[in-house]
Image: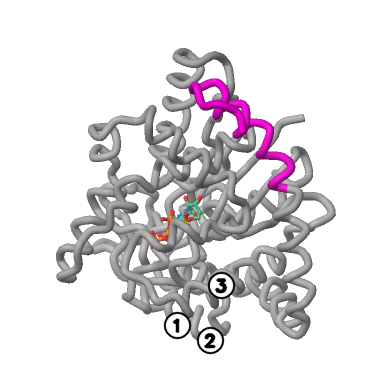
Amino acid sequence: MTRVLSGIKPTGHLTLGNYLGALRRWVEVDQHRSEALFCIVDLHALTVDHDPARVRRLTRRAATLLLAAGLDPERCTVFVQSHVDEHTRLSYLLECVATDGEMRRMIQYKEKAARERQRGRSVRLSLLTYPVLMAADILAYGADEVPVGDDQTQHVELARDLAVRFNQRYGHTFVVPRATRPKVAARVMNLQEPTSKMGKSDDSGPGIVHLLDEPETVRKKIMRAVTDSGRDVVHDREKRPGITNLLEILAACTGGDPKELCGAYASYGALKKDTAEAVVEVLKPLQARHRELCADPSYVDAVLRAGAERARRTARPTVDAAYRAIGLLPA
Ligand code: AQP
């Protein structure tokens, strides 16, 4: 059976981008057709300036939202990365296989390091090495597939390279994973700045739809989305990024084709209205389930505890094998 692993970082409140780019596929496809593991990658949230209490809060909230969206602990393993030591154990070994040049070429590193500097903060070493920890997240579990949005494909490529290199040098140890992307909405853009990704750690509120936004807030944000000059509704990422973003969101929410949807709209206003309603409908059941789960935090704790145990059992043999293969004396 194919094994799938993916994660989400508790650096902010989950967004429509996280949902359409990743979470929805985990729920609708991956947990049904594969042996699937999903984690809240809390260690990755420490790579930029952070507030400890907030990270804890966001970790719990992300876990609750994953379950509210429909991940079923009977079908898949849901856990918190820092509860399973195998991730950091393996990460060090992979740091001994990765190169400094590889790390510095990572687009997310360049962008996030620039943002930290702009804010007058120093850049944490872990921001540079974070893709290696992400490779460890994936390789420890022998994942065949990693369902991610567009922005994470470069990191999955790195995990592939490290797996191949390790296997060539030290003998076959790791499965070589591959990224899978959604057909539409692989990169949901910020509604106010449609040439930038809708990211959860950005502060520009009106451009970001959060999964727990009230329906009225969702409507307002989408109705006020920045559109392009011109009047006709066309799908063109380069020339019409604002309208194309709305078409992608609407198509992802309704199961349509963004290019075919163009013909159905004579004005930007009508497209915005339908997009807003489609998003509200998609979020409604998730928000209702989230309210129920919040009333029973012990259930979420129990799911995470059981998930971590199962994850540990799955990862340990591979990580132990990597320790032996690289030349470390067994304890
Ligand atoms: N805008 C997006 N469109 C499509 N997919 C997206 N993902 C994130 N944003 C979009 C996908 O969601 C999964 C979890 O993302 P993450 O938590 O690892 O963080 P990220 O990719 O770095 O995205 P964020 O939300 O923008 O976080 P910050 O702002 O902290 O960097 C991934 O599969 C991702 O591709």
For residue 220, the mark is 1
| Rendered view: 232 above or below 155 | below
Image quadrant in which you'd find residue 171: top right
How many neighbours does mark 2 have within 10 angstroms: few (below 14), some (14-19), or many (20 or more)?
A: few
Look at discs 3 and 1 and give the one toward the viewer.
3
The image shows residue 200 at horizontal and vertical percentages of 42, 67
Look at the numbered disc 2 and say if its residue's Cβ is closer than 8 Å to ligand 1: no
Q: Which residues are magenta?
A: 311-331
Residue labelled with disc 3:
211
For marks 3 and 2 on the same chain, the one whose residue lies earlier in the sequence: 3
Gap in angstroms between the C-alphas marked 3 and 2: 13 Å
Q: Is residue 174 magenta?
A: no
In the image: residue 184, left or right of residue 106: right
The 10 Å Cα crowd at callout 3, few under 14, some 14 to 19, many 20 or more, is many
Q: Are marks 3 and 2 in contact (CB under 8 Å)?
A: no
Q: Secondary structure at mark 2?
A: helix
Residue drawn at (38%, 31%) of the image? 96
- Relative placement, left or right, of 249 versus 284 is left
Q: Nearer the viewer, residue 283 or 146?
A: 146
The residue shown at (71%, 82%) is 294
Beta carbon at label 3 within 8 Å of ligand 1: no
What is the three-letter code of the residue carrying label 3? Leu
User: What is the chief secondary structure element of the magenta stretch?
Assistant: helix
Q: Position of residue 253 (x, y in %)?
A: 60, 59
